[in-house]
Image: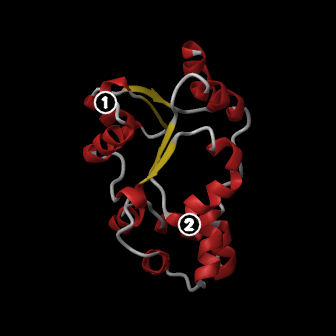
Amino acid sequence: MSVWASYAGITAEELVPRFSLQDKDHERFERGEITSAHFFNSVRETLRIDITNAQFLEGWNSVFVGEITGIDDVVKRASLRYPLYVFSNTTLPHHVVWQNLCPELLTKFKKIFVSYELGLRKPDEEAFYAVAEAIGEPIHQILFFDDSPENVAVASRLGMQIVEVKTVQDVKERLELLL
């Protein structure tokens, strides 16, 4: 928010109460149903800021700071024994950023499923079923890691084995049990 605030000539504190990712346009953007320009305009209108698309994109992508320290080794080791997949609620702009920030890490995954390409997003049940079908595994054979309690709850209800991730240590500890 600080990037947007700086370009808009206001404080980040002024933007915080206006901002929410819990809206229909954000969900539609993550499902690939609307363009970046449409989403950017919607958020600018909600935030009541007048910044360019380039400025908006800079702020939108500023949430990424790089690869999580310590995750590469555990993912590499797990990938030697198990097929690994990514299933991310994300947008095209964010996907481009994290592909560039973590290219080596991402090679350890057999396939990357992104919501804007699937047209489906977590926690919708059909999104979980679509990914399970695409990887060719029964849903109960999938170990699902996610930082969203809502996503984890739905995955668990569908029969997936789950790990609610709060820290990288949660991932390491669960994978260490399997390795």
Q: Determine the CA span between mark 1 and mark 2.
A: 30 Å
Q: Does 129 sit above or below residue 36?
A: above
Residue 70: mark: none
Are discs 1 and 2 less than 8 Å apart at CB?
A: no
Residue at (33% x, 34% y) in the render: 155
Depth order, front residue of 61/127? 127
Residue 76: image location, x then y, percent: 66, 30
Crowding at label 2, few (<14), some or many (≥20) Cα neighbours within 10 Å?
few
Depth order, front residue of 137/86? 137
To which residue does mark 2 refer? 93
Of the 4 image quadrants, the one containing the N terminus is bottom right
Residue 138: image location, x then y, percent: 30, 28
Q: Quadrant of residue 157?
A: top left
Q: Does 171 sit above or below residue 54?
A: above
Instruction: Count up the numbered dots.
Output: 2
Residue 114: image location, x then y, percent: 45, 53
Residue at (63% x, 26% y) in the render: 169
Q: Quadrant of residue 46?
A: bottom left
Q: Earlier in the sequence, mark 1 or mark 2?
A: 2
For the question of whether residue 60 can be seen, the reply is: yes
Of the 4 image quadrants, the one containing the C terminus is top right
Q: Does 70 sit above or below residue 121?
A: above
Q: Mark 1: which amino acid?
A: Ile
To which residue does mark 1 refer? 139
Crowding at label 1, few (<14), some or many (≥20) Cα neighbours within 10 Å?
many
Residue at (38% x, 34% y) in the render: 152
Query: In the visual, does 8 lie left or right of 162?
Result: right
Q: Quadrant of residue 14?
A: bottom right
Residue 82: image location, x then y, percent: 53, 25
Disc 2 is placed on an element classified as helix
Q: Mark 2: which amino acid?
A: Pro
Residue at (31% x, 47% y) in the render: 127
